[in-house]
């Protein structure tokens, strides 16, 4: 019994926190402080030697607290807890998902490098990859979700930049279409292009599934990224991000974070710790509700199609990827209303319980129109290739009673008047 290993959900209330260091408080206080008092000058010197990599840490030595841009108890405990879900060596928390993503891309991509990335990706990521990275001399090569690793290898060869491939970046399931990418096959492709001097890294944005239902590190990824604004925060009341990986890559991520200064605040870290206590119950409830909602929408006469992982058909490539790397279908549903923007807007404007807002993963259900909202900035031709259409609505299912959600969706769909263009004689 002594070796019993607790599940992450059982450790979210206590892991990494010592009440005796905080007057016995059961909950970790907010360490709302910019700096920490050293006991002696010698101690301050030793802490800086470790923090700045001037010497290696002794096996028994712990990096002491210095200054809240470098480390803070709220951040450290939160990071330790997040490591449990993904079985990562280390984690760094950021002030937003975008700061986590941009810090990783800036640290591991240098002028002349090639980045291969999956489409579609979150709108902000798409902008950073297509508008910022090229401005610092990084070449980018976008791939479509149905392309196999072999096809992508052919594209890399054709680009003439195979020798400068530095990273493969994936978002799976992809926002907003729910397309899946086979993490392992792209991690293998990265290995194929790695040399003894230069490892090609794979990074996965796991915001839609993680940290519960998909663990990219187990499938060969080097870095896992999150918008912690979404499921991890889970209450639509904060903005944050996280990166996880092995010690070597995380040391680099943390050093750049120290100098960009884009770590999360102690207050937000504290809110995230509170959120982590209910992460499993929230996400379990959300995926159960989403399965009921998706089944309802799938049979609705005013809906053309529903993209939901729980509705993937056995025998398809997407289904095989799903079985291989996801443990639940999640709570993100993309539906295509019959008609176009007009009909999609009628549907959105008539929702009562579900709120019309971007973002996802929170306790309340949210719906939005990717084409004109989250993905408004994505190139039009690209959007066509990725099937982001004017009739598409993205729905994030919250923790409400699924019966109430279905009632709401049903009454809003009743108000959609599908224009019968095909039948008009004029
Ligand atoms: C929201 C989101 C982001 C960006 O995160 P922020 O916390 O808003 O900066 C990145 N990736 C995905 C998949 C997202 O949904």
Image (cartoon, rainbow, N blue to C red):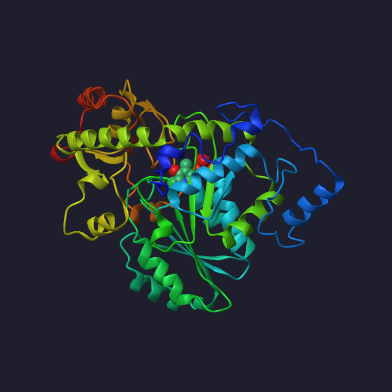
In which image quadrant can residue 261 be found?
top right
Towards the viewer: 271 or 290: 271
Quadrant position of the C terminus in the picture: top left
> Furthest-right residue in view?
41
> Furthest-front residue in view?
1
Q: Residue at x 74, y 42 (%)?
A: 67
All told, the count of numbered labels is 0
Q: Is 228 left or right of 261, judged from the image as shown?
A: left
Q: Residue at x 50, y 49 (%)?
A: 83
Q: Residue at x 38, y 45 (%)?
A: 212
In which image quadrant can residue 280 be found?
top left
Check the image and report above or below for 103 versus 161: above
Residue 376 in view in this figure? no
Residue 259 in view in this figure? yes
Check the image and report above or below for 315 versus 300: below
Towards the viewer: 413 or 13: 13
In which image quadrant can residue 28 be found?
top right
């Amino acid at each position: 019994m002594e070796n019993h290993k607790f599940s992450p959900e059982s450790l979210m209330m206590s892991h990494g926190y010592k009440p005796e260091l905080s007057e016995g408080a059961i909950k970790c206080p907010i360490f709302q402080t910019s700096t920490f008092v050293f006991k002696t000058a010698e101690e301050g010197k030793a802490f800086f030697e470790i923090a700045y990599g001037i010497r290696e840490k002794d096996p028994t030595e712990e990096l002491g607290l210095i200054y809240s841009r470098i480390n803070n108890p709220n951040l450290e405990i939160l990071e330790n807890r997040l490591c449990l879900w993904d079985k990562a060596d280390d984690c760094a928390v950021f002030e937003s998902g975008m700061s986590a993503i941009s810090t990783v891309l800036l640290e591991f991509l240098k002028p002349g490098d090639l980045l291969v990335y999956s489409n579609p990706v979150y709108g902000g990521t798409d902008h950073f990859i297509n508008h910022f990275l090229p401005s610092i001399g990084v070449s980018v090569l976008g791939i479509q979700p149905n392309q196999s690793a072999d096809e992508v290898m052919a594209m890399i060869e054709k680009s003439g930049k195979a020798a400068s491939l530095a990273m493969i970046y994936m978002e799976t399931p992809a926002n907003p279409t729910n397309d899946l990418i086979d993490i392992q096959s792209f991690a293998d492709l990265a290995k194929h292009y790695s040399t003894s001097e230069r490892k090609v890294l794979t990074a996965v944005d796991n915001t839609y599934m993680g940290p519960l239902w998909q663990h990219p590190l187990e499938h060969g990824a080097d870095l896992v990224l999150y918008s912690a604004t979404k499921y991890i925060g889970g209450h639509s009341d904060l903005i944050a991000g996280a990166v996880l990986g092995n010690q070597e890559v995380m040391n680099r991520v943390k050093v750049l974070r120290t100098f960009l200064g884009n770590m999360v605040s102690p207050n937000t870290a504290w809110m995230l710790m509170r959120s982590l206590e209910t992460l499993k119950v929230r996400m379990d409830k959300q995926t159960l509700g989403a399965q009921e909602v998706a089944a309802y929408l799938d049979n609705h006469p005013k809906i053309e199609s529903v993209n939901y992982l729980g509705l993937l058909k056995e025998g398809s490539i997407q289904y095989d990827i799903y079985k291989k790397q996801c443990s639940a279908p999640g709570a993100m549903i993309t539906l295509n209303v019959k008609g176009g923007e007009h009909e999609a807007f009628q549907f959105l404007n008539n929702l009562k319980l579900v709120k019309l807002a971007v973002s996802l993963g929170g306790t309340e259900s949210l719906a939005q129109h990717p084409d004109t909202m989250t993905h408004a900035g994505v190139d039009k031709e690209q959007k066509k290739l990725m099937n982001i259409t004017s009739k598409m609505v993205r729905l994030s299912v919250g923790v409400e009673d699924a019966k109430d959600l279905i009632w709401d969706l049903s009454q809003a769909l009743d108000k959609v008047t599908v224009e019968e263009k095909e039948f008009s004689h004029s």
